[in-house]
Image (tube, helix red, strand yellow):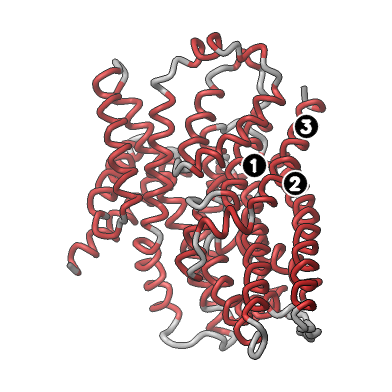
Amino acid sequence: MIVLDRIFVTIVLALAASVLATEVIGTTWTRPVAAWLFVAFSVLGQARFGLRERFLQAIAAATVVATLLTRDDQWPLIERGLYLAGYLTTFMVLITSLRDGAHRSNSVLAIGRYLTERPPGRRYTALYLGGHLMGVLLNFGAISLLGPMIQRGVKAQSAGAPELVARIREQRQLVALTRGFAWFNLWAPTSIALATTMTIIPDARPGWIAVFGIAIALLLLGVGWIEDRVRGNRASAALRRQGYATPQLPSPPFPLVAVLKFLTVGVVLVGAGWSVAHLVHIRLVTGVFVVCVPVAAAWLVVQYLDGSAPEPGPVATITEMLLRSAPGGCREAATLALAGMTGALASEFVDAHSLSGLFSLSDVPQAALLVFLAGIIPIGSCLALPPILSVTFFGTLLVGLPELGINHTLLALALLCGWSLNLTGSPFSAASLVLQRVTGVPGTTHSWRWNGVYTLLAFLVAAAMLLVLSTVFA
């Protein structure tokens, strides 16, 4: 078993090296190597995969077989799909390395305690922004880290209080966290959603996507805060009718030094990624994941230098990080990669021009098409269709229809909005599944009971923004 583990880690690291060589150096022979290394990753990772990953493997295999039987250009298409899967696997594995620095960081723990101990009136904003910004470095690790911290804090603060108090506090804090996390996907170069979307729509403008995405995220902070206050006032009224007065909790001091350290890591990560992207002329998303491991390693070294990290030494810890990151994110990487590959290959079976003529897509306003995309992705996710499959399918399909005149930046933004809506609105979303694993809250409770109204409101805000932008950039 140990031998197989080492072989698997070697395969993953070789896959990452092949993708980096293809993207950064521009070598051509490493592209098919990366494609077939993904096949090896998929086969050797069986023991680490669950039912979802095996189901996606079966769908991907069926798509490959259909491509072989029906297409004359089957091998270039299959290689392209396998390389996309390898690229997404590499992104997930390298991004996972940042979790090691975060989980060992006293600064991250101090920020987590501050966010979860805020008074109710200011806690929603703190957790929304905390989940949003911590998602940039930790990705789904932000939910894994802060979710259990919220539960521990609620248990400590609710001792001696009615059970309803604890339930309400837990619900309000967890939804604030996941809502904030959901919308970082719109703009952050470390987000899986943006990495995927920029891969299939490479001429979209990430700078404008970031501007529009941050604007939507801030609007939804206000929408969510109002919804939370309404929910909180109703809960307080119900508790008062039971004769329980909600105590005023003290506000903890702002951890300025911890926040500055955390922001420094984020600035270094994005700055280094931008520099690499500018120097070698690659996408910003690719530049960011190129520097993830060096930044994570430097973060660990700094923790040892200031005495905040325990033994073993930095060299041993960095080595352990590399060996653990490779298999550590393999399930998420497999889900992402297999669904992305399936969506890309499936789009090749659809005659885009015939479909456009059948549904008269050329007569459909750009705004209506963008709003449709933002809404269909979370609906598909509620039916257990991974959002990346929908994004790669619709993105690849519509990019192949230049006669529609769709603004590719707005197309990417609409797909990203749909992906973000899935995170709060679907019990099968990665956010719901991670939250269920670390806190025990069922996915249907998190998505439909707690976030159902909010997701509908968020869709209306996103749709309104897409309508306005479609008019401006018509």
**In the image, is residue 86 above or below residue 12?**
above
Nearer-N-terminus badge (2/1): 2
Q: Nearer the viewer, residue 239 or 471?
A: 239
Question: Residue 417 got which mark?
Answer: 1
**In the image, is residue 460 above or below residue 238?**
above
| Residue 134 in the image, given as x and y percentages of width and height | 63, 65
Q: Nearer the viewer, residue 321 or 114?
A: 114
Question: 10 Å neighbourhood of mark 2: few (<14), some, or many (≥20)?
Answer: many
Q: Quadrant of the N terminus?
A: bottom left
Nearer-N-terminus badge (2/3): 2
Mark 2 in CB contact with mark 1 (< 8 angstroms)? yes
Between the C-alphas of marks 2 and 3, the distance is 12 Å
Residue flagged by tag 3: what amino acid is it?
Leu
| Residue 367 in the image, given as x and y percentages of width and height | 72, 26
Q: Residue at left 31%, top 52%? A: 51
Q: Nearer the viewer, residue 358 or 323?
A: 358
Question: Residue 377 got which mark?
Answer: none
**Position of residue 331 in the picture relative to residue 314 (left or right):** left
Residue flagged by tag 1: what amino acid is it?
Cys
Q: Quadrant of the C terminus?
A: top right
Question: Residue 469 got which mark?
Answer: 3
Q: Nearer the viewer, residue 308 or 122?
A: 122
**Position of residue 428 in the picture relative to residue 467 (left or right):** left
Mark 2 in CB contact with mark 3 (< 8 angstroms)? no
Q: Secondary structure at mark 2?
A: helix
Q: Secondary structure at mark 3?
A: helix
Q: Residue at left 45%, top 66%? A: 437
Between the C-alphas of marks 2 and 1, the distance is 9 Å
Residue picked out by circle 2: 216
